[in-house]
Image (cartoon, rainbow, N blue to C red):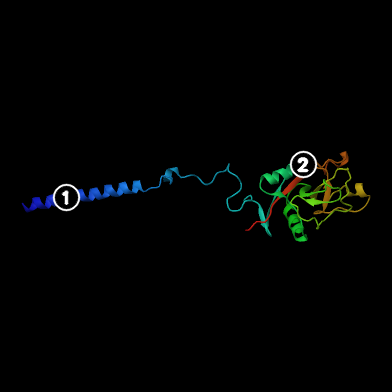
Amino acid sequence: MAKKAKSKMSNSTATIIAALIGAAAMISVVFIPRWLPLPEQAEDKHDESSSVFDETTAYPEDAIYFNGSAYKVFDIGMTWYEAKAYCENLGGHLVTITSQEEQEYIEGLIANHNRNFYWLGGTDVTHEGQWEWVTGETFEYSNWDYGEPYNAGGNDYYLHIYRVPNPHVDAFHGEGSSAAGKWNDASYNVYFNEYEVDFFSLDATGFICEWSSISN
């Protein structure tokens, strides 16, 4: 009789344990939030086709941060207006250079690239000779090349910076020399005379985008 009682108690204990396990499983199912993906459903956070922006920086991940702004050089042949729109579509603007410190930084930034010159965000298309930055910043600092701005073609209203010296500067001015890092005014599509096409062409053009007021 004692053995039977022991067996009966064991069966009862097993039943209780099984019931507790079942209840725990039901509770875990009930309290899993419906919005929480199961492990096999978790989204891949790395998407090659997604935007280059990340949620915390608001500028491209491969842009380079310096002194409150981020910069990126593009070796892409575009007109000034196309480059301006390109930068703005990325949430930035064509670069504005407002100090000697920034000038020297930009010179170093483009030094290892391969275009002859790069668009800056300056223009005097509204009033000839009154240069303005696309951001509305005061146009006080400048770094013009020898004899510039010259408006040689009559519609040279757009600003670029030389990565390498302009070999044709003497053709414009009869003397003087050009230098890397200096500024020049050009038409929006950099059209010049036929003999200058080797240096001034969209194939030799790039641009620089800037994202201002960045906290790193």
Which residue is painted at 46% across and 45% down in the image?
A: 42
CB contact under 8 Å: marks 1 and 2: no
Question: How crowded is the residue under tag 2: few (<14 C-alpha within 10 Å), some, or many (20+)?
Answer: many
Which residue is painted at 43% across and 43% down in the image?
A: 40
Does residue 1 appear anywhere in the picture? yes
Label drawn at residue 43: none
Q: Secondary structure at mark 1?
A: helix
Looking at this view, name the residue that lies furthest to the left. Answer: 1
Expressed as whole percent of the image width and height from the top left, the position of residue 69 reads: 68, 56
Label drawn at residue 79: 2
Looking at this view, name the residue that lies furthest to the right. Answer: 174
Query: In the image shown, does 45 or 130 lie closer to the viewer?
Result: 130
Expressed as whole percent of the image width and height from the top left, the position of residue 1 reads: 5, 51
Which residue is under mark 1?
12
Q: Secondary structure at mark 2?
A: loop
71 sits to left or right of 130: left
Query: In the image shown, does 167 or 186 lie closer to the viewer?
Result: 186
Expressed as whole percent of the image width and height from the top left, the position of residue 187 reads: 83, 43
Please identify the quarter of the rendering in which residue 100 is found. bottom right
In the image, what residue type sits under mark 1? Ser
In the image, what residue type sits under mark 2? Thr
